[in-house]
Structures are given as C-alpha cells and as structure tokens.
Amino acid sequence: MSSHSCLRTSIELSSNNLDGLFNYLTAPNIRHKVKHPLFLALKFSHCVKLYYNTSILPGVKSEQLLESLQKKLTKEHCTVKPMNAMGNNLDDKFFILFVEESPDNFKHKKINEAIESLACPSLGIIFNLNR
C-alpha cells in the first residue's frame, strides 16, 4: 500500500499543470528544487512559457538562445542584488517567463514567492489569469 501512495505522490508532483507546479515548488521532500526558467517552461509547459524579446535579440539562432539566457542569468544573479522585476518595463527584458496565474490566491502567492528570485534585469516574470 505504501508503494501505491508513493506512486500517487510522484504523479501528483509531476503533473503538467498549475497544481503540479505548486506541488513541485512547495514539496518539503524536494530539497534542491530546480527553478531554472527553461526547466520550468519544459516541465510545466501547460502553465509556464519562456519567451525572448525579438527586438533586443533579433535573428538569434535557437542554439544561441539557451547560451544567452544562461550567461545573462548567471552574470546578473552573481553581480546584481535581487530585485522585483515583475512590475518593471518588459520591453527592456531579454526574456519573459510567463506563468499562468492560479485562481486560488494561496497557490498563486506560494508560486510567486518561489519564483520571484528569478527576476533580474534580463528576465521578467508575468502572471496571467487564464480562466
């Protein structure tokens, strides 16, 4: 019976929706959670999208996008103090992490708290209520 509940828990944690994202980000048994924007966009593709700004990065090949994202995030998170970039002008951002907003205020707040540290001068975060 315990193996059945373990299977159910892992399925709930890995579901590709807002509940799965919430469960992943708040799971006490996952100590070193991956919060990289690309990972979140791939793992939770039904509720998280990663976009790049074509006016700032025109004609960039897809192979170069990941490298550019990684360089900018690494440099900015190592040298720039954390900031709340959710309200800033998104036209200046190289990348945008779009997260579907949960209609449940508690879940929305917890998801926001878990990923707000990703915001930096190159990465903006947008929440959108999709009912």
Image (cartoon, grey):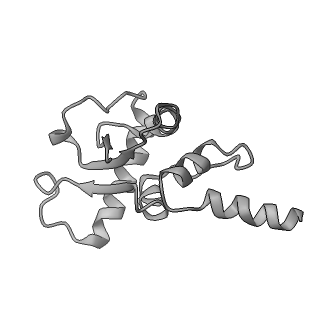
On screen, 117 above or below 45?
above
Q: Residue furthest right?
A: 1
Left or right, residue 92 beside residue 86? left
Picture coordinates of residue 20 (x, y %)? 55, 54
On screen, 32 above or below 4?
above
Q: Nearer the viewer, residue 60 or 10?
A: 10
Picture coordinates of residue 62 (x, y %)? 27, 71
Left or right, residue 9 beside residue 99? right
On screen, 120 above or below 45?
above
Left or right, residue 117 beside residue 130? right
Specify whether residue 125 is in view: no
Picture coordinates of residue 22 (x, y %)? 55, 46
Numbered marks: total: 0
On screen, 72 above or below 109?
below
Picture coordinates of residue 87 (x, y %)? 27, 29
Q: Residue at x 34, y 56 (%)?
A: 49
Q: Residue at x 14, y 51 (%)?
A: 56
Q: Quadrant of the N terminus?
A: bottom right
Specify whether residue 32 is in view: yes
Quarter location, residue 101: top left
Quarter location, residue 38: bottom left
Q: Residue at x 32, y 47 (%)?
A: 131
Q: Residue furthest front?
A: 131
